[in-house]
Amino acid sequence: MTRPLVDRISVGDTLRGALELTRPANCVAAGVLTATGAFVAGVGDAFVAAGLAVATTVAAVAAGNAVNDYFDREIDAINRPDRPIPRGAISPRGARWLSAALFASAVGLAVPLPAAALGLAAVNLVALLTYTTVFKGTPGLGNVLVSALVGSTFLFGGAAVGRLEAPLVLAILAALSTLTREIIKDVEDIAGDREEGLATLPIAIGKRRALWVGVGALGVAVAVSPLPYLLGTFGAVYLVVVAIADAVMIYAWSESFTDPAAGRAHFKYGTFLATIAFVAGRAALLV
């Protein structure tokens, strides 16, 4: 008689599955954005607060990823059967407990931060919890919520060190470009989302129309991207790097019409370059 799958999964497999559930690369990327927000705002002597903000972001994003996989386990069985829950590396109950522990960690880390950062953390934690359960299947609204969360990581870093003004433009640029990336992702996942009965934007209005909505958001981001230089927030090196980032993201968007998976992957390179542009632009003013 074949033993149940759960009996055949080793402790090492479970630990690897739990780590994979949190999407470590995404957590690190979010932490980098928070650190960038603090750096652009001017960390000064608030290194401890900036570090706590980064750690809070990493824990919160890990928790959100875990709870998202818990609620998406049936969709992932179609779209991504290699994810930890569908393949049996971790149980749905284990994913729930992991997410709860990570959310509790994020709350504990955020408590010593200034009031503005603490308030922003509270709003974002609620948004992470409600995204999958309330907004994900609502055409466009789920995309907007995720985009706002990504943009707010810059604000959170600035709020942690007591300065919100400088990271504000960065937050808007990040939110707009993320909106395009999220729409591309929904186009990529349309088969599983339709099977699950979700009304994502591409399902509601069609793939091509959804991608054109994405280009509208990206177009605004590209048009606004020189603003930090014009406002004196960043040095000239920012313009060079952000121009490359803009070009990569525009190419990735056009590619998504024929290959959404490749388009989404390449779009990430563009957002990574944009983050480098923010850091390099600020550093150029400090030299």
Image (cartoon, rainbow, N blue to C red):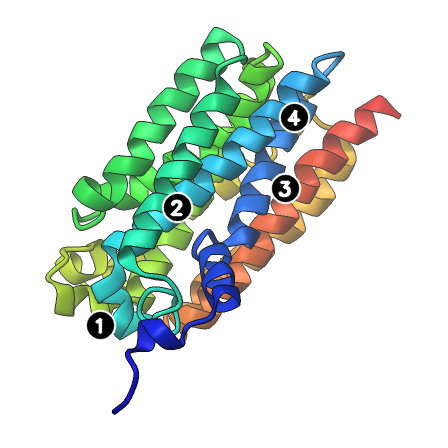
Q: Which residue is mark 3?
A: 275
Q: Residue at x 42, y 23 (%)?
A: 121
Indicate the position of residue 138 as horizontal and vertical percent values. 16, 46
Q: Marks 1 and 4, how far apart in space?
A: 40 Å
First in residue order: circle 2 vs circle 4: 4
Q: Which residue is mark 4?
A: 51
Q: Which residue is mark 2?
A: 98
First in residue order: circle 1 vs circle 2: 2
Instruction: From this view, report whether residue 26 is shown above or below residue 15.
Output: above
Instruction: Identify which amino acid the numbered label 4 is placed on.
Output: Gly
Instruction: Identify which amino acid the numbered label 2 is placed on.
Output: Leu
Q: Marks 2 and 4, how far apart in space?
A: 23 Å
Q: Marks 3 and 2, how far apart in space?
A: 30 Å
- Furthest-bottom residue in view? 1
Instruction: From this view, report whether residue 248 is shown above or below residue 44.
Output: below
Total numbered labels:
4
Among the 4 quarters of the image, the one containing residue 54: top right
Question: SS for tag 3?
Answer: helix
Nearest to the eye among marks 3 and 1: give it: 1
Instruction: Identify which amino acid the numbered label 3 is placed on.
Output: Thr
Q: Marks 3 and 1, how far apart in space?
A: 32 Å
First in residue order: circle 3 vs circle 1: 1
Pointer 3: residues within 10 angstroms few (<14), some, or many (20+)? Answer: many
Q: Which residue is mark 1?
A: 191
First in residue order: circle 3 vs circle 2: 2
In the image, 283 versus 21, the foreground residue is 21
